[in-house]
Each structure stands twice: as structure tokens, then as C-alpha cells.
Amino acid sequence: MAQEKKQVRQGIRDAIEIPQGVSVSVANGVITVTGKSAAAESRALRTATVQAAIEGSSLVFTAPRDTKRERKLIGSLKAHIRNIFRGVTQGHVYKLKICSGHFPMSVAVNKNEFSVKNFLGEKIPRTLVLSGNVKVKVEGDHIIVESSSKESAGQTAAAIEAITRRAAYDKRIFQDGIYIIDKDGKGI
């Protein structure tokens, strides 16, 4: 029986440029990014096959094998790091619209609590506890959610939208609620 030779693939190496005004550190599998306008954001690698290191003005990702799995992991990490770079320099913003046709609802933010009163005539206000790194502002019939973390801003906007979701009502008739009208980076 002839021995089959396995072709060994070389490792993969990919880099992302670090923007001006941003400092990056890598320690124990955690990438920490600090910018001029926001607090530090971090991302854990969560995999033993992909390593990160800083070389000059680049953040370099390496993996011992060049497989589809490692390429996907590195691509995902690069996308997350780009979002963190944008978050610590510019921030992430989501916009929501308050629609109240049947009952005049009132929306308020007090410290870290978001509340909706008189939604569809309900006597008990609906509340949501906000995380510490997200800023929520109510300006007329618009709600603005800002954060340096895209995940935190998106999850908070989705939670605010979910507060007023009602499954038993016909959406064609009862259009009351709070709806996302502008996602960060999407431009709905």
C-alpha cells in the first residue's frame, strides 16, 4: 500500500491598520482599544487557534493553519475591531421614533431607567434598566441611543423597541409603539 502524502498548508496572517489617535494593547487573549473620545473597549479572542499581536502601526492576526474556519474567525475579528475603532473615535448612534396615535404615551429617561407611560392606555408604566455605557436621550418624538460599543447600542435600541411590542394587536390598525428608524452604519 502506497503511503499518501498529506499536503500541509502554511499558516494564515492578516493585519488591520490602527488609526491615528487610537491605542491598542493585547494581553492574555484580550484586545483592548482606547480612543480620544471614549473609554476603553475590549474584545476577547475566544479561540486558541487565532493569535493577535501589535507590529508597528498594525494589529496582526495569525493562525497556524490556513483553513476556512480560521479565515472566517479572522474576518469576524477584523470586523469587530473595526467597529471598536469607529466606536472609540466617533461613537455609534441608533435613532428610534415614538408613534402614538390612539393614546398619548410619554417617554422619559431617569438616570439609568427608561420608562414608557400610558402605552395603549395602560396604567402601569413599562420600564427598562439601561446599562452604564449607553446614553439615551429623548428629543420630542425621537429617541437617540449612543455608545462606544456597537453591540451595547444595538441591544439597547432593540430592547427599547421590544418594550412596546404587542403580539395580540393588529399592526395595521394599532401602530402605536417605538420603532428603530436609523441603525448605525445601515441608514434605513
Image (tube, grey):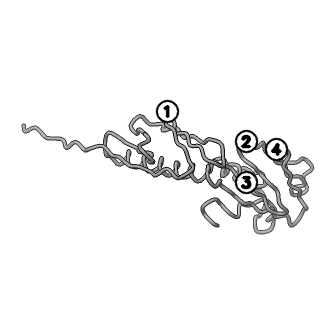
Mark 3 residue type: Val
Find numbered disc 1 in the image and state the secondary structure of the residue it sits on.
strand
Which numbered mark, 2 or 1, is in the foreground of this view? 1
Mark 3 vs mark 1, CA separation in Å: 31 Å
Q: Which mark is residue 56?
A: none
**Residue 139 higher or lower than 159, as above or below:** below
Q: Earlier in the sequence, mark 3 or mark 1?
A: 1
Query: What is the residue that sits farthest to the bottom in this orientation?
Result: 172
Q: Which mark is residue 145?
A: 3
Mark 4 residue type: Glu
Measured as percent of width and height from the top left, residue 52 is found at 43, 40
Q: Nearer the viewer, residue 179 or 182?
A: 182
Mark 2 vs mark 1, CA separation in Å: 26 Å
**Circle 2 crowding by C-alpha within 10 Å: few under 14, some 14–19, many from 20:** few
Q: Mark 1 = which residue?
A: 27
Residue displayed at 66% across by 46% down: 38
Q: Which mark is residue 113?
A: 4
Tags 2 and 1 touching, CB below 8 Å? no
Q: Earlier in the sequence, mark 2 or mark 1?
A: 1
Location of residue 98 (image quadrant):
bottom right
Tags 3 and 1 touching, CB below 8 Å? no
Find numbered disc 2 in the image and state the secondary structure of the residue it sits on.
loop
Q: Earlier in the sequence, mark 1 or mark 4?
A: 1
Mark 3 vs mark 2, CA separation in Å: 12 Å
Q: Mark 2 = which residue?
A: 131
- In the image, 22: left or right of 11? right
